[in-house]
Amino acid sequence: MSTVTADTHAAQGEHAHTSSFLKTYVFSLDHKIIGLQFLFSTLIWFSVGGLLAMGIRWQLAYPWRPMPLLGNLLAANEGGQIAPENYTMLVTMHATVMIFFVIIPILAGAFGNFLIPLMIGADDMAVPVLNMLSYWFMWPAFFLIGSSFFVEGGAAQGGWTSYPPLSVIQQAAPGSLEGQTLWLLGVTFVGISSMMGSINYMTTIIQMRAPGMTMFRLPMTIWGMFITALLQAFALPVLTAAGFMQLSDRMFGTGFFLPEGAMANNSPMETGGGQPLLWQHLFWFYSHPAVYIMTLPAMGIVSDILSTFARKPLFGYKPMVYSICGIAGLGFIVWGHHMFVSGMNPMLGMTFMVSTMMIALPSAIKTFNWLGTLWGGKIQFTTPMLFAISFVSMFIIGGLSGIFMAATPVDIFIHDTYYIVAHFHYVLFCSTTMAVFGGIYYWFPKMFGRMMNDSWGKVHFTLTFVLMNCVFYPMHILGMQGFPRRLADPYHYETFRNLLPLNQFMSWAAFLLMASQIIFIINFFGSMFFGPRAGRNPWKANGLEWQAPSPPGHGNFDFQPIIYRGPYEYGSPETDEDYYPQTQPPKEKPMTNDQ
Amino acid sequence: MSTFKNNNEFGSRLMNHGLRTICLVSSLVALNLAGCDFHAPQFHLNMVQMLSDATPTPKPYQEQIADVLDGMFGTPDEPFALPETGLDIRKLKMSAGPAWTDKKGAAFGLYRQHCVHCHGIDGDGQGPTALFLNPYPRDYRQGVYKFKSTYNPAKPTDEDLQRVLINGIPGSAMPSFSLLASAEIESLVEYVKYLSFRGQMETALTNYVYNDLGEEEITDEIGEPVLDDEGEPVTKLIPLDPENDEEQRTAITEMLAEIVEGWNEANEQIIVPEEDAIPTDVENLKALAASAAKGRELFYGTRANCMKCHGPTGLGDGQQDDFDIWNKAHKQFLDSVADGSGEPQLATEREEVAASLYPIRNAIPRNLRNGIYRGGNRRIDLFWRIYAGIAGSPMPGSGPASPGAQGTLTEEEMWNIVDYVLSLPYEDASRPQRALPINTELVN
Amino acid sequence: MKHFWSFLFFLVPVLGVATFVFAPHFNIWLPRDISEQGRTIDSLFMFILYLTGAVFIVTESVLFYFVWKYDGKSNEQPVLFSHGSHALELVWTIIPAVTLLFIAIYQMQAWAAIKMDPPPISYTCEVTGRQFNWDFRYPGPDNELYTLDDIVRTDGKLYLPVNEEILLKITSGDVLHSFFLPNLRVKQDVVPGMAQKMWFKGKKTGGYDIVCAELCGWGHYKMKGRVFFLPRNEYDAKLAEFSAEQNTMRVEVPEEE
């Protein structure tokens, strides 16, 4: 992958250092190369995670039928039908790969690394070595979790939430043999990588802004990254600690999460006296903020794209910033809504219900402000804009369906059903991933100096948009019927028997959705080599990153950026153009007010 | 709000039909694209048996045995049963083949839907999931079943197998299948029997080939042995070819008849408790306690000696170093492979098979204080376990081994033990064991 | 087509609502409710559904309208140079806040009734989840669990009296499970080491599904059960039959064919 970037950069030729290829493109300290390394790695894992999802969809559409393509790899039975433990492995690893190897690193790692210094006017990250390490610490995780598919018993099978005792008692599930150990170690490495990144991002954003770049002139993307970094810094230690506790339960005979007399598969455990619910508290104390880690940067990206292509200032910049902060703050006191039926004291359920209801508020404010941004603009329907609008459209669905889950009595019924699956796929796939696609189309010229093909981008968008709704929207009504998640063969229940045809429809939509991503792959790599050259500012955008060369060389800017205004001054009466770059000095008096 | 859920027949039919058609067409396209990369599964030979010291079987014979078995029993997708087996081919077809559901919702390929991932396509108890289960799933191929109503060496009745399917085997990974339609359960029982027949036939053929066929010296036209360069007589294997060999055909027919006979007479082998030994007032707690006290004496006594394995506390912590017959067969095989004994030309094959076997597991006596009994928790179930033992496991029977023989305990005593075992879960575990000192040497 | 994109986004509210409108006609909806608290839960669900549905329709339509109206190709108006509106921000902060708080407080009573106030009765049955079966232990004639006359059933069929308050004790033999009765709208995770209570009242006779709703291992999907609600007399007869069955000491030998 690095060779690809090598070519484009070599073509650029501006910053041909004497250093070796290895140092420039593999063990690079340049934030842009590291960002692209993250981008390529996560896109590869994205396709792996997608294939795992196809396995799930096949089993749900044609239970116990021989599985094509993946069958030889995953189906342990003769005749190509999947073995049930492999189905639980599929659901576990699909979520693990998508969350830990795709969404978190693509937002924070790829976009964060590439954009933060460019958007704040720094020449690189505060600590480039740490930045490089944060990428290379992903590789042990890639290796550990990738190899866990091939150990005895297969990869982890306890769900991505890895609830003990299933995950702790080695005999409880085949995946709890070696697979779970590798999983825990892998996730720990992802955590180390994220932690390094987050320290770096915070330092960079606080310390290295260009002259005039006040906190309230930062683009929303940077605000999203900044708050994300804060969330990671505070939440990750808990997950890491919990992971080590689970590891020690598994390997050194402690009993943090094992109750007295714990036993599974006729293999009694010698330790006990712990609490399975403790893990759930610790895990969700990280993983609920992690939900926002997976959303806030995407919200930032969408804010930037919407404003750029509506040719209009972002509506309510400060309320947007405050709501991001509000989400981050409230995000730490809502974890219990994952545990309403877990056996936790029901009194706590009430508290968590109120805080959870409240966290819907900042998201609502943001949505209204996005709509406000479109209001009265001159919308250009470029590919990134379409993805950004679809983010708003889909986020409304994902946000509203969350209210059902926050309502404790309703959650009793829909907990662990496809209603939840629909909800988080609307937030994570239909929203965040749309923002990621939008971001790639939007910043591709900056990354590679060439434009992506807009027509094929629109074909990709239309297919993705239509098909993903075909896949995920029906999950709501499946969930209404109580259709439980992670069930290899639900059709033996009388209640769910009639849902098979609908699932087959969804599965076919999913297969086509997967296939339509081929358009993106071709467009991505084709444009990298053959796309028309982009100038510095192909979108006529205000952001500081668009003032740098495309792609920016080492040190990013060929001039000292001085910032005069916020990034969203589109259609400003102060200038004749419909955009007003952050670095363009004002005509009359320098240094106007903050706006 | 349940009023919303009205039955719109037309709507659901339209949806089912439309979607089904679309899905079917596209799945055909996809299957073609995928190039149908799976093969119809085949039955495999019991290689442990083929390569064991007792009946080492050369490769040509293995193939011939497989051919004969194919001819008699078909393949997993296309099972076949000779009329003399008495198996119902329609029931078999319901369970065999890949899993699918017809338009009316009738399920087919039941065995692959519910059983195969543990019990394996051959019924060898070595499906992909089996490795992770404790205890291992049953290997049907010897026709030995643990939880049955008949004498130890006898086959189980159909009802016994059905009861296991309905109640599951609590304390193992075998779940209950009581929610399947009774026709489906019957079909599965039939299929399990079919796999047993096939496995037993395989064993019989292996023994037959080893005992009655083998190498024969080649003779020339006048009956003189043909010699090779070193003056040794040239030999060849007598082929197993029942199609062309009348004698072999008769022998095989007899073997099959014997196997079928064993299953058919299971109903005559049911252990019927003697009417006058059956306790009359189990509802009376006092009588029950008295009976349990007697049972307790027996439990710790040398005659019944339950304590030896089930332990002084009944926790199953007594002697644990024995094996059931399935693990024992594998262990013997592994030991002989490790010795390097046996036919040298089979050595590499033997090593391959040895490497593919699951780790040997000891037979762990049941913890009687759980109140969960694998073979069922009715009094009669416990009585049968004590009477006949558990076939295939180290648990011996205390009753006569076959009708008319002599047992170690009287039926009355067995009922006493039943009462004691049933009361064990509610007994204080720290209650001093009076009989303990006498029997300590047996425990150690 | 001129406004292709705006109409594409208009499909979201149209098809989104249509899905929910037509789902009942395809027999996909909340499963038949036979419990008391199910009514509360369903009406709360519907309340939130209508509320969020309204918000959904309004916001998605506004989105469509803006995307259609302010299409750069057709919109001749100059760009509205606005950085936001303080008043609007206040409006769309306060109204959702009040609504959300209202929903939260509105639900508390129902939550308390379902999860916090168990009825003062003795256990009807103990449910044990284990890999991979639901086992049921009825207290038997003496109405007390863990005595010799308990009835233990492992066939995954739970029998309960209809129209009576039922208190279940749910435990686990190994890992986490979740005892889920879709038709009664009750669900409770089963945690080893913790005995949980679950109470409800079934109002219609018949058999309903028991689902395991927490991943419990490879055989998660095998943890099927059925709960049967019977009139009191039939229920008593059923238990007596089970009790007798457990005490079976004779065997019927099938007739020779």
Image: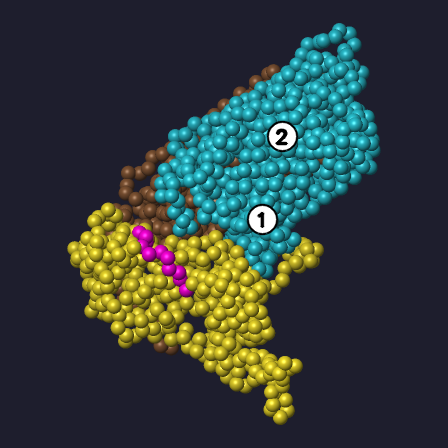
Chain colours: A cyan, B yellow, C brown
Above or below B298: residue A387? above
Q: Of residues C10 and B439, which is closer to you in this image?
A: B439
Residue hosting label 2: A134
Displayed quadrant of residue A528: top right
The numbered disc on residue A150 is 1
Query: What predominant SS class does the magenta segment belong to?
Result: loop
Residue range highlighted in magenta = B315-325
Residue A180 colored in magenta in the image: no
Q: Of residues B403 and A147, which is closer to you in this image?
A: A147
Which chain does the residue under circle 1 lie in?
Answer: A
Query: Looking at the image, do the residues carrying marks 1 and 2 touch, with CB atoms under 8 Å apart?
Result: no
Q: Position of residue A378 (x, y in %)?
A: 74, 25
Residue A387 in view in this figure: no
Residue drawn at (65%, 26%) of the image: A129
Quadrant the C terminus of chain A occupies: top right
Residue drawn at (53%, 29%) of the image: A236
Q: Of residues C43 and A199, which is closer to you in this image?
A: A199
Quick one: label 1 or label 2, which is nearer the N terminus? 2
Would residue A418 be found to the left or right of residue C135 on screen?
right
